[in-house]
Amino acid sequence: MRRSRARSGASALPGAMLAAALAAAPALGQGLEEPLTAVPGDPVAGAAIVGEPTRGLCLLCHAGPFPDVPFQGTLAPPLDGVGARLSVPELRLRIVDSRQVNSASIMPPYHSLVGLTRVGERWQGDTILSAQEVEDVVAFLATLTDPPIPEETE
């Protein structure tokens, strides 16, 4: 079922403004300063998106403080302590389009359609996450300030 624009919520930064903000992001310390919505992110909703295997798919590549989620990924940096390592604007940029930080990133652009050429017809014109969902994920990731607990060795 295709998400409608009405359900996903409009971005506070229209397409052209978001593209300009993405273009300027590296010059601004690699972050998107302006929230994508007027509604603050909800960390509880963000945690649900990060942990849901069919929504954000974050844990396919990342591991983190999610004891109830088996088989977490090892392809990308762990999410433990990410809120202490990165600022909210830096987190937002990485969720919107991580290619702005690392052009070779395998992380999908969750809220950008810029430069996408191999998108199935069903998904043409849709972002993976709505603007509000991006803000929710960013709010959750910002709460992850504790470093990982070292594994016990025998």
Image: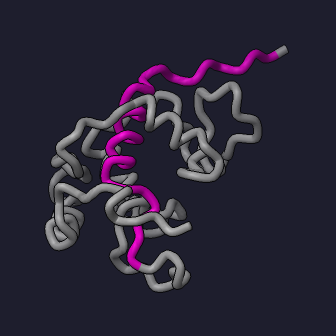
Q: Which of 58 and 10 is in front in this view?
A: 10
Asked if residue 55 is positioned above or below residue 3 in the image, the reply reads: above
> As rendered, which of 114 and 148 lies closer to the eye?
114
Q: In this orientation, which residue lies closer to the viewer: 53 or 10?
A: 10
User: Can residue 154 be seen in the rendering of this structure?
Assistant: yes
Query: Going by the image, does 6 lie left or right of 3?
Result: left
What residue range appears in magenta? 125-153
Q: Does the magenta stretch include residue 151?
A: yes
The correct choice, above or below, for 133 with respect to 6 in the image is above
Q: In the rendering, at what x and y percent does residue 58 appear?
A: 56, 48
Is residue 102 among what the camera can see?
no
> Which residue: 20% across, 65% down?
18
Confirm whether the magenta stretch covers residue 40.
no
* Quadrant of the image occupied by residue 24: bottom left
Q: Which residue is drawn at 22% across and 48% down?
A: 37
> Which image quarter is the N terminus in?
bottom right
Whether residue 35 is situated above or below residue 13 in the rendered picture: above
Residue at image point 46% right, 28% down: 81
The answer to which of 48 and 2 lies nearer the viewer is 2
- Horizontally, residue 44 falls left or right of residue 134, namely right
Residue at position x 56%, y 52% in the image = 55
Q: Residue 66 in the image: x percent, y percent?
A: 63, 29
User: How was the colour assigned to the protein in this rendering?
Assistant: one colour
Image coordinates for residue 50, horizontal then vertical, percent:
53, 41
Q: Is residue 76 above or below residue 118?
A: above
Q: How many numbered circles are shown?
A: 0
- The quarter of the rendered structure image containing the C terminus is top right
